[in-house]
Image (spheres, grey):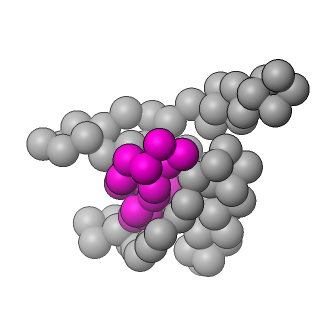
Amino acid sequence: MKYNLSLVAAALSNFCEEIGWDLVNYAPNQKNKAQLHGIIIDEEGNRLEVLATQSGNYYELLGNKKFKQIDKKGLLESRKEKRVS
């Protein structure tokens, strides 16, 4: 199965737009070409480095080979709540 990185980039871009983040740049992950490495600016102006996987999961890179999974569903729900308020 051929993996299409442009689809992952589009999904990440759409997600960022929905929650108020800006996807600044992205490229294939150097260590795993099936993953996308993205640079994001969140709504508070913080710079985040994110890995987007083939399965649709996103991980924030924390440095020193540490990472945490981004709760996509939670962020989308909290964004909807903020709009209603």
In this orientation, which residue lies closer to the viewer: 83 or 5? 83
Tell me: residue 82, above or below residue 9: above
User: Where is the N terminus found, in terms of image quarters?
Assistant: bottom right
Classify residue 33 by image quadrant: bottom left
- In the image, taking residue 40 as reference, residue 20 lies left or right, namely right
- Report which quarter residue 43 is drawn in: top right
Q: Is residue 53 left or right of residue 65?
A: right
Q: Position of residue 85 (x, y in %)?
A: 82, 22
Segment colored magenta: 37-53
Mark yes or no: residue 61 visible: yes
Q: Is residue 52 within the magenta segment?
A: yes
Residue 24 in percent (x, y) is at 47, 69
| Helix, strand or loop for the magenta stretch, by majority | strand
Residue extending farthest to the left is: 64
Is 22 above or below relative to 1?
above
Please say whether residue 81 is one of the residues in the magenta stretch: no
In the rendered structure, the answer to whether residue 12 lies left or right of residue 64 reads right
Residue at horizontal 18%, vertical 44%? 63
* Observer-nearest of 72 and 79: 79
Residue at 56%, 74% (x, y): give it.
Answer: 5
Is residue 34 visible to us here? no
Provide residue 32's location: percent of width, then percent of height.
34, 65
Q: Is residue 67 above or below residue 51?
A: above
